[in-house]
Amino acid sequence: MFPPYQQRGVPISPAAFNALLDEVRSSQLVGIVGGTFQRSIGGTNISIPDNLSKPSSSGTLDTVLCYFKVTDASEGTTLKVEVQQDQIAGRYPDGMGLGFPAFRLEISGNCYIYAKILFNTTTLQIDSSSEAITVLQSNELQENTASEQYILLATVLTKTGPVRIDKITNICAQPIPNACALAWSD
């Protein structure tokens, strides 16, 4: 049902107002397959990456999109993960970029893979140094500090006997630096 047109200066009836609300709610985005959306006071931003689909072994298209996807890259008994190269805020993390070799991290047991963003706390912008955006592994959960934001990319679980990577859980969302997420103190 479309809400009826109203005349200027005439109060809107509760039924017409409710019909208007129903129409607006029915047009509201609540999710998107293969992309992301952010709702803010200024509107809704929809992002659908152009590398959304890739052919599978069966010849069909699979919807695969995972920013900084972490995979097992172990060599013998040396546990390693490979982190897919991508950009954060238009910049490659330190050690990544066009023409760079695969980005690998040596791990020791169960760990977390993070993107660490260093902010200039005066300007609230990402620091200009080449080490301002890095990808690292940590055996401990990391908390944001007054100048560093840690964005979880993946968790890695290992097994013993023999030691091996058992499970990798990728977050897959595009890491978005946010100065408001820093640990501000009074």
Image (cartoon, helix red, strand yellow):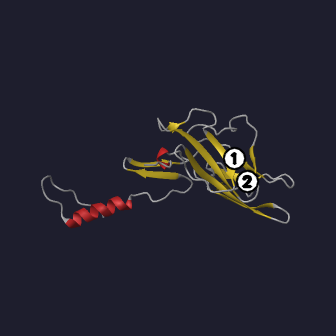
Point 64% across, 42% down: residue: 134
> Can you tell which mark lies on residue 84?
1
- Estimate the spatial distance between the alpha carbons at disc 1 and disc 2, rounded to whole Å: 8 Å
Going from N to C along the chain, the mark reached first, 1 or 2, is: 2
Amino acid type of disc 2? Thr
Amino acid type of disc 1? Gln
Residue 45 versus residue 114: which sits nearer the camera?
114
Mark 1, Cα crowd under 10 Å, few <14 / some 14-19 / many 20+, is some
Residue 85 versus residue 12: which sits nearer the camera?
85
Q: Secondary structure at mark 1?
A: loop
> Can you tell which mark lies on residue 71?
2
Query: Which quadrant does the N terminus fall into?
Result: bottom left
Is 127 placed above or below 79 here?
Answer: above
Q: Is residue 2 visible?
A: no
Q: Outermost residue, front direction?
A: 186
Cβ atoms at labels 1 and 2 below 8 Å apart: yes
Residue 89 location, x and y as percent? Answer: 55, 40
Residue 177 location, x and y as percent? Answer: 53, 44
Is 52 placed above or below 129 here?
Answer: below
